[in-house]
Amino acid sequence: MIMFWRVILVGKIRFYFSLVFAKLMYYGFKITKLSSGTSVIGMFVLKICPEFLTYADSYINTKINVTGTNGKTTTSGLIAHLIKNDNYSVVNNSMGANMLTGVVNALAVNLNPFKKFDYSVIESDEAYLAKIYDRFDADYLLVTNLFRDQLDRYGELAKTKQLIQDGIDKKKNLKLMLNADDPLVASFEGENKIFYGIENVYYADESLRADSSAEEVFTCPCGKELKYEKKFFAQQGHYYCDCGFKRPYVKYRADVSIYKDYSILKINDINYEIPLVGLFNAYNALGAVALALELGIENIPENLKTFKVAFGRSEVKYLNGKKVLIQLIKNPIGANEVLKTVDKNSNILIIINDNYADGRDVSWLWDAEFELLKGVEKELVVSGTRAEDMALRLKYAGIENVKIIKDIKKAVEYTGKSADNNITILPTYTALLRINKIRNLRSR
């Protein structure tokens, strides 16, 4: 018994020390700008206190996780924003570091041993969800979508889905907020499932539709190809099969109107305006609003309008006085939806890296429909460790006026000097981290 309490006491001391260490390290990075400090602090914290998540669990009342292939950072950021602006305390890994060290990093930097948070909103990498749930409790899990992504890490979609299901199976009382329009997401097994989905999509201008010719074919669990009454993009829509499998009952359903710089969700005759572009972001916002409504959060329409996007997710910055729109791309479906929104009159810079966090396999470039950039008249710049691969892909897409500048900083500076109007930057994840450190590229 004495040994048991001694272990508990030592663990608590390690936990408190790790919190102090994390905050000192965070402020050190902030002053020196040596690192963005989104994961490295978490790595050291786990060395000091391997049971950190177990101890951190008791400092948060309601725990929310967001996972899926695309939209995790935006969706979790929206949820945290709505909670915070309804005067609740919330901790969120807002920079998008969603593996184990990133989650620990966010908690260690924000937790205070003398107070509890009302909520945590934690974006979780699909492959790390079960590992997080081994040590950290959960009340809600929102799943955005499942697309092919980082084949070198996840393999095909069946594996990705199983990784998430493994996490769900660890928490029997977990409430699942699921995208009903994605047949893979809707078919997750759980005792408490709540669905959100889109009923109709309206475009304020037909030029905003920018339909892709790329089609995703998905089969029913019975093996037959799914049929659709409505199909919005990829496999998302109103699906059914002759065997009886179909889109489930949707509790939070929305009519969506897409405008050039914003979208409007209409849910139960209430309009929710979101300062985000594209149908893919409308899905993100719908998931966030649905969860906020489920939690009883108030003043949602007013607070949505003040949301500031996470870095690289439709983020606006300025370079040499010119407006820069930064849109993360990382897999075929996500890239296609972003490419549909690109201003072809802007100067475009595409940055492709193949580091671990990006996925080593860049074959997805050939599945993404870069043909949507046809008609771009200005020089298109490519950069990053796989700049040549991107240039080759653009050549086969029929885009000839391409310049390769492998060094990311030089590519950004070149684009800033040569641009006569707005700039669009499409980076992969580690490229996004790199450009975030370029001082001339700043928020207004």
Image (tube, rainbow, N blue to C red):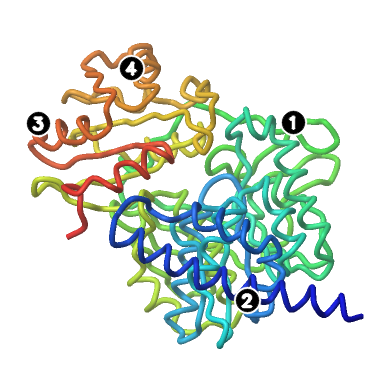
**For the residues bearing labels 3 and 4, Cβ distance under 8 angstroms:** no
Question: Looking at the figure, which quarter contains the N terminus?
Answer: bottom right
The reply to whether residue 199 is visible in this rendering is no
Q: Residues within 10 Å of mark 2 (few under 14, many from 20)?
A: few
Secondary element under disc 4, as helix, strand or loop, is: helix
Please tell me which residue is depicted at 51% across the width and 31% down the height of the picture: 332
Residue with the mark numbered 1: 225
For disc 4, the marked residue is: 391
- Is 369 drawn above or below residue 65 in the view shown? above
Taking 135 as reference, is 61 above or below it? below
**Sequence-wise, which precedes: disc 3 or disc 2?**
2
Mark closest to the chain's N terminus, 1 or 4: 1
Q: Secondary structure at mark 2?
A: helix
**Mark whose residue sits in front, 1 or 4:** 4
Name which of mark 2 and mark 4 comes first in the sequence: 2
- Residue 5 in the image: state x and y as whole percent: 82, 80
Report, in whole angstroms, how far the alpha carbon at label 2 lies from the one at label 4.
46 Å
Q: Quadrant of residue 300?
A: bottom left
Using the numbered discs, state the Cα–Cα distance from disc 3 to disc 4 in whole angstroms: 19 Å
CB contact under 8 Å: marks 1 and 2: no
**With 111 as the anchor, is 13 left or right in this view?**
right
Does the rendering let one see residue 287?
Answer: yes
Mark 1 to mark 3: distance in Å? 49 Å
Q: CA distance from mark 3 to mark 2?
A: 49 Å
Residue 98, above or below 172: above
Q: In the image, what residue occupies the spot 64% across and 55% down?
A: 143
Amino acid at the residue labelled 3: Ser
Mark number displayed over residue 294? 2
Q: CA distance from mark 1 to mark 2?
A: 34 Å
Residue 128: image location, x then y, percent: 67, 50
